[in-house]
Image (cartoon, rainbow, N blue to C red):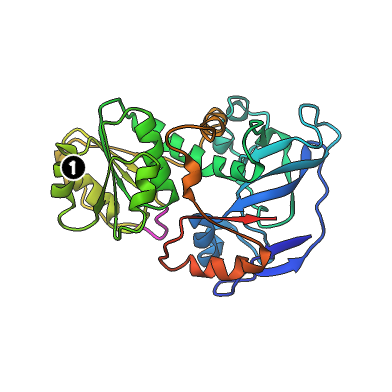
């Protein structure tokens, strides 16, 4: 099968033919319909030691496909089932796993494998797609679930004013869920306006430019300071900025992947008695809710998709995404 392989830092992904994997007793073999390119994939290739990435590994954790073959102990799925995959693989039998929270299993590992034509995953990681959802769109379930978990962690209430720093896929999906959960104002901020229309299509009530005037612009658009600020970029200093922007007794949610440490002055958080929380991954109930949300509605997460590419374009597109582009969510399709 064709797969995009990681060779090393500074080297583009390499497309090569590798052996189709065989499913273990509790696994299924999937023919992958689509896999999203995630910003964390870019981070992994720049800092492989931190993320346990090794040469010849296959990236890709946002994927969906059709089951081709089942392991001997798989009874609740069958060949032909179309499924989305939750990429956190736990042991399957601890308390966390039994609660549907494999992300917090002591043996959890974040699987890849989506940048290929086939992959094996544990059957318990799969959820069958709704009948009216195209298989490729099931690849959006993973980032949509992350964003839902982020909003759940924030404690958002109907009527809250929300500021989202970063108009990448996760920031835009946080806007989707915040609006869906009843926020009165959902303002997305970024360095440029190229995602402004997409933010509105996903539910944002306004868009602002990041910079020294952001606090004033938010007040003008929302009628007050933000109750919740979501930091969805992962750059040094943005947690500090979020703490300065949020209202007294407000909430700051750290979402962006900031590798290598950060710098911030806790006085702003202390003096305003800010609630500072962090969010990562999701549980299986949230994954199932995300799949339902991919159906018809006023705001659709499918608006994220800006391009679908074949394997021939993977290496070039992956490198282009390291730079700031107008792309949002690129799907690798069979």
Left of 32 or right of it: where is 154? left
Residue 259: in magenta span: yes
Residue 14's place in the image compared with 291, above or below, is below
Residue ranking furthest to the right:
72
Number of on-image labels: 1
Q: Quadrant of the N terminus?
A: bottom right
Label 1 CA crowd tier, 10 Å (few <14, some 14–19, many 20+): some
Q: Quadrant of the C terminus?
A: bottom right
Question: Where are the magenta residues, as a range?
Answer: 257-261
Task: Tell me, yes or no, if residue 130 can be seen here.
Answer: yes
Left of 225 or right of it: where is 65? right
Question: Quarter-wise, where is residue 235 in the image?
Answer: bottom left
Q: Position of residue 103 (x, y in %)?
A: 55, 38
Residue 106 or residue 236, whichever sits in front: 236
Left of 18 or right of it: where is 38? left
Left of 22 or right of it: where is 242? left
Task: Tell me, yes or no, if residue 232 can be seen here.
Answer: no
- Seen at 22% across and 45% down, the residue is 243
**Main SS of residues in magenta:** loop
Disc 1 target residue: 221
Q: Tag 1's secondary structure?
A: helix
Q: Position of residue 303 (x, y in %)?
A: 47, 46
Residue 69's place in the image compared with 236, above or below, is above
Residue 312's place in the image compared with 272, above or below, is below
- Seen at 55% across and 67% down, the residue is 317
Q: Position of residue 212 (x, y in %)?
A: 16, 57
Q: Position of residue 219 (x, y in %)?
A: 15, 42
Residue 303: in magenta span: no
């Amino acid at each position: 099968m064709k797969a995009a392989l990681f060779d090393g830092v500074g080297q583009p992904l390499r497309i090569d033919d590798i052996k189709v994997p065989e499913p273990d007793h509790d696994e299924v073999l999937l023919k992958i319909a689509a896999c999203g390119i995630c910003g964390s994939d870019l981070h992994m290739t720049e800092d492989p030691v931190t993320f346990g990435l090794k040469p010849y590994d296959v990236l890709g954790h946002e994927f969906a496909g059709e089951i081709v073959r089942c392991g001997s102990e798989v009874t609740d799925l069958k060949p032909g089932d179309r499924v989305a995959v939750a990429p956190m693989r736990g042991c399957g039998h601890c308390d966390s796993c039994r609660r549907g929270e494999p992300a917090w299993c002591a043996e959890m590992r974040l699987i890849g494998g989506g940048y290929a034509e086939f992959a094996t995953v544990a059957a318990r990681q799969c959820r069958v797609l709704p009948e009216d959802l195209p298989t490729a769109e099931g690849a959006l379930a993973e980032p949509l679930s992350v964003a839902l978990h982020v909003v759940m962690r924030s404690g958002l209430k109907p009527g809250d004013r929300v500021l989202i720093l970063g108009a990448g896929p996760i920031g835009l999906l946080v806007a989707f869920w915040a609006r869906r959960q009843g926020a009165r104002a959902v303002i997305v901020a970024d360095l440029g306006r190229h995602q402004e229309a997409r933010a509105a299509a996903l539910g944002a009530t306004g868009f602002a430019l990041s910079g020294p005037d952001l606090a004033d612009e938010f007040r003008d658009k929302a009628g007050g300071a933000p109750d919740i600020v979501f930091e969805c970029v992962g750059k040094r200093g943005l947690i500090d900025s979020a703490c300065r922007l949020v209202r007294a007794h407000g909430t700051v949610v750290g979402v962006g992947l900031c590798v290598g440490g950060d710098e911030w002055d806790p006085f702003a958080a202390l003096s305003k008695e800010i609630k500072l929380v962090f969010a990562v991954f999701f549980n299986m109930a949230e994954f199932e809710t995300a799949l339902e949300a991919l159906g018809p509605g006023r705001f659709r997460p499918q608006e994220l998709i800006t391009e679908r590419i074949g394997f021939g374009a993977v290496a070039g597109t992956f490198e282009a995404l390291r730079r700031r582009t107008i792309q949002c969510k690129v799907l690798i399709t069979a």
